[in-house]
Image: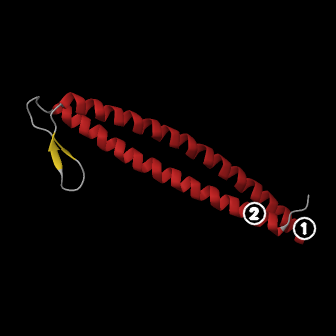
């Protein structure tokens, strides 16, 4: 089997592309895990509060509104937490697949490089 420098360059480009995809997946997963933790902590704090304690929700920037229905807010946060956890699991599977593909490509590239060096010597 003859290995050309062009083959090697193509493999390197594929590896770089996979590495970038992997970094994006890891970054997205970390962001979602942080958000999930925030939502989880908010739910825990809500459960500690007395029923008559006023609750305010930040709508972005400096705007906050008083929550009228605590039960609705809890359900909304639980739904959001469930969605975040599903997305984290999905990204974990994607990360695992990308890591496996990246490792296989590295091994293939290493093998080709060894073959190329053997042909030069």
Is residue 114 something that shows in the picture?
yes
Q: In the visual, does 95 lie left or right of 48?
A: right
Element at label 2: helix
Viewed as shown, does residue 87 lie left or right of 7? left
Location of mark 2 (residue): 10
- Give the image location of residue 47, x and y in percent: 20, 31
Decide if residue 66 is on the left or right side of residue 95.
Answer: left
The number of numbered discs placed on residues in the rendered structure image is: 2
- The CA distance from mark 2 to mark 1 is 19 Å
In this rendering, the answer to whether 38 lies above or below 120 is: above
Model colouring? secondary structure
Quadrant of the image occupied by residue 109 = bottom right
Q: Is residue 121 visible?
A: no
Q: Is residue 28 above or below residue 51?
A: below
Looking at the picture, tell me which residue is in the foreground, 72 or 78. 72
Point out residue 73 in the picture as x, y percentages from the top left corner. 24, 33
Left or right: 2 as drawn, with respect to 85: right
Element class at badge 1: helix
Residue at image location 18% in from the left, 52% down from the top: 63
Where 62 sits versus 56, above or below? Answer: below
Q: Nearer the viewer, mark 2 or mark 1?
A: 2
Q: Classify 10 Å Cα crowding around label 1: few (below 14), some (14-19), many (20 and above).
A: few
Residue in the picture at 10% in, 37% down = 54
- Return the residue at label 1: 119
Q: What residue is drawn where x is 91% and y is 58%?
A: 1
What is the number of the mark on residue 53?
none
Mark positioned earlier in the residue sequence (2 or 1): 2
Q: Is disc 2 in contact with disc 1, using a CB cutoff of under 8 Å?
A: no
Q: Residue furthest bottom?
A: 120
């Amino acid at each position: 089997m003859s290995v050309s420098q062009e083959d090697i360059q193509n493999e390197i480009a594929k590896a770089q592309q996979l590495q970038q995809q992997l970094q994006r997946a890891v970054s997205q997963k970390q962001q979602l895990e942080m958000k999930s933790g925030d939502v989880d902590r908010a739910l825990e704090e809500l459960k500690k509060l007395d029923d008559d304690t006023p609750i305010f929700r930040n709508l972005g920037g400096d705007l906050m509104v008083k929550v009228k229905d605590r039960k609705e807010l809890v359900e909304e946060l639980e739904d959001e937490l469930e969605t975040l956890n599903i997305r984290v699991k999905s990204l974990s599977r994607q990360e695992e697949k990308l890591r496996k593909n990246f490792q296989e490509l590295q091994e293939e590239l290493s093998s080709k490089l060894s073959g190329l060096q053997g042909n030069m010597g």
